[in-house]
Image: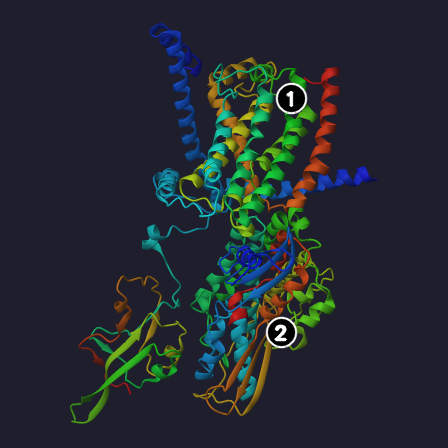
Amino acid sequence: MYNQTEIIKDTTDLGPDGELVINMGPQHPATHGVLHLVVTLNGETIKKIEPHLGYIHRSIEKMCERLSYRQFIYVTSRMDYLSSHINNTACALLIEKGMQIEVPERAKVVRTILNELTRIASHELWIGAMAMDLGAFTPFFYAFREREMITDIMEDTCGARLTMNYIVPGGLMYDIHPNFQTKVKAFVKQFKEKVTEYEDLVTGNIIFQSRTKGVGVLTAEDAISYGCSGPVARASGVSCDMRKIAPYDAYDRVEFDEVIETAGDSFARYIVRVKEMNQSIRIIEQLIDNIPEGEFVGKTKNVLKLNKGEFYQRVETARGEFGVFIVSEGGTTPYRIKFRSPGFSNLSVLDHIAKGSKIGDLMATMGTLDLVIPDIDR
Amino acid sequence: MLSLESITKTTQDWLFAKFSPEIALTIECVIVILLCITLFAVLGLVLVLLERKVAARIQIRLGPNRVGPGGIFQTAADTLKLIMKEGLTPDTADKFLFNLAPFIVMMVAMLLLAPIAFAKNFQIWDINIGVLYISAVSSLSVIGILMAGWASNNKYSLLGAMRSGAQIVSYELSAGFAVLTIVVLTGSLRISDIVASQENGWWLFKGHIPVIIAFVLYIIAVTAETNRAPFDLAEAESELTAGFHTEYSGMKFALFFLAEYINIFIVCAIGATLFLGGWMPLHIGHWDGFNHIMDYIPSSVWFMGKTFFLIFVIMWFRWTFPRLRVDQLLNLEWKYLLPISLFNLLLVTVIAIMGWHF
Amino acid sequence: MFLKDYISDVYNGVASLLKGMRKTGYYFTHSKEIITEQYPDNRATLKLADRFKGEVVMPHDDNNEHTCTGCTACELACPNGTIKIITKFDVTPEGKKKKAIDAFIYRLEMCTLCNLCITACPSDAIKMVPNFEHSVFDRSKLTKVLNKPGSKIKEGIE
């Protein structure tokens, strides 16, 4: 039988030193998706955070063992649904590398433009959601107005707005819509006018700055040792942009800067993403006027078979480095697929940087890590 | 035009002629009570819808527009829904305090209606310490909030209530100093005297610099007192679910919700009375023709117009700024607002003594 | 020095807040910027993109003929078994037996709209239409048979 103290401990959720243990999520307005955080508090200071994952685990990697090499690409759209084109590009590139398929120039350029548009759309949604976490509800709607233009372009060309499944091994599934170029140019023009709104409403706002400056500082050594990538690592001074280190598609032909900040706090992560959006616009401007004519898909066999061996391909999504690893036994379906998701490594650093801060800071920190939980749980 | 003042006068004369004085007085009290409750109900309906529509327009969308033309019956539908909801009381909650808390918050809001002058000679109670009464009674709302947080037997509610209590108690000081500025200039605590002293111009224009600073400080302080954004961490949905009213559902939640909006109305009414002239129309110097036209607009319309303008400004704050953290909020009060308001009080005393105001 | 910092702090803070308020004030007063669509009311004028992937259909021409040969390429290409083709054997006028489809069963509730079946079809028998209003009260209505009753394949398709 329990004695008195054990019964009280069991029913009042006190930690080992009498601290308060609360659960944030899985249903919570601020965790972007179903993330269960067990937070141990001492008053208002955080002592430990333990994420419990798996609420949206759909055994995607196991499912892909039964699908052929053309069929498994659509699942990756549903993992990190905000960078669906980029995930599809990773799978397509891996198969092209493995089977030595030639990709025509037109397909490469269009794929790059679509990747950059997806990156901007993802960052737009992130700005809106981050401001909403901190209590400012209006930038969400302004950000969605720009994102709406991008999803309209995607709807015209690819046929879907969120999970596009348009990039196939060899190039594109079908040719781009005739008004693709005009719409993208109109979007670039509007974006340049409206991006100052975020400056006024969010970046320059003294309340926002005081809530994010000096909060959740991540040093460069910690970023490397925890395996962070993407804007999280770049804000701490680590240079890790896959588009520069291992260029794919048309990235070796365009000029853009890799945005690096050294402060490592939440404000630096915010600034990195805003500047990345501007760099993406620069890339699109360089490519949109001269899309080469020609085929949109290379010649491939009907049934794709990878040779026996191991293949790996990595790309830079909006969240960081996304990797696809395939072990093939020579058949039409992969023997084992593993996806290296950027969110998983970025989440692992949350306990380290949020220790000792307040709950309000936890919101700012978690918001700037830009987590998409289906990406983590697959 | 039929003015509110003449309606009250005729009613009083008729009642005192018909009944004995005690019964006439009782009937008058009953009429006032019924009018107050009606005002609350109507204000609640209007303000909730106004907030949603203002929020929608700022966020480039239309607000509620399906229930009734332009959405005017939306709040009635919401109230109906809240009434029909199951009012759940947690098992381990302190039942007496749990049920009492919303009523205390409502009572404070109702008590504050007494000294406000809605139109010319249309005040419920023109007490000679009107401003002091307002400051004192508005401090009582903290009790209701702490009661709600404590009685819910829920860690989130307790955390939210404690934060809210600290916030309200701190910002009362700045609000009090801002109000004192006007008292210094007028020389009286009585509301009708303050409004009468603004006959040749509102204090916002007559008292130039110190009154403008006091006005800004007052608006910030009352936004914090009523737990509105950017100071709304007591009810921050993304941080601690709903703070001190997490455990309330059904009609009791509706009372909290309503009491918040009524509080906003009351503090804006007080702000309009003190700084913007109450029911006084806008008179500019010696432009007699203009002043004469302004006099045609009834005084109740002037009062309501000014109050709703201030309500709009407070709503504008909510939808523009992110939330402050609790230590930043208390920082703002004790390190910025309080020193500035003390300095401002000194400034306005000097100006009042030297007669350097208009 | 402290006083100068203090005052400039306050001034910069207030200035940044006022800039933000001016932006939202602009959107409050300019209601022509509203971009939301009033959905059920504007159904008559709603225009979706041509390529929007809403549902798979089999187009029939005026003689109630389609072009599906029953080769089951789409059934093999589909990643999650949404399509099932039931074939039968038709007798041609010359007396030879020819494969034809009896029913083309398409389960809308399972379809991921990935377009692989359309690209796999060698005779352009199926296509995607931009129809997004799929809600039904009875789930069995989502299992559709795409070829119309009494239809047969067009002449000359192999």
Image-based side of B2 in relation to A341, left or right: left
Q: Distance between the Cα atoms at labels 1 and 2?
A: 66 Å
- Secondary structure, mark 1, is helix
Q: Chain of mark 1?
A: B
Q: Quadrant of residue B250?
A: top left
Q: Residue at x 72, y 15 (%)?
A: B355
**How many marks can you see?**
2
Most foreground residue, B215 or B28? B28
Most foreground residue, B141 or A4? A4
Q: Residue at x 32, y 70 (%)?
A: C108
Q: Residue at x 59, y 45 (%)?
A: B321
Q: Residue at x 53, y 46 (%)?
A: B157
Residue A229 in sight: yes
Q: Position of residue A110 (x, y in %)?
A: 53, 72
Residue A68 in sight: no
> Where C63 falls versus B27 (above or below)?
below
Q: Residue furthest right?
A: C1
Kindly identify the amino acid type of the residue bearing the numbered disc 2.
Tyr
Q: Position of residue B271 (x, y in %)?
A: 57, 27
Label 1 neighbourhood size at 10 Å, few (<14), some (14-19), many (20+)? Answer: many
Q: Are marks 1 and 2 in contact (CB under 8 Å)?
A: no
Image-based side of A365 in relation to C55, left or right: right
Which of labels 1 and 2 is toward the front? 1
Label 2 neighbourhood size at 10 Å, few (<14), some (14-19), many (20+)? Answer: some
Q: Which residue is mark 1?
A: B182
Q: Which residue is mark 2?
A: A251
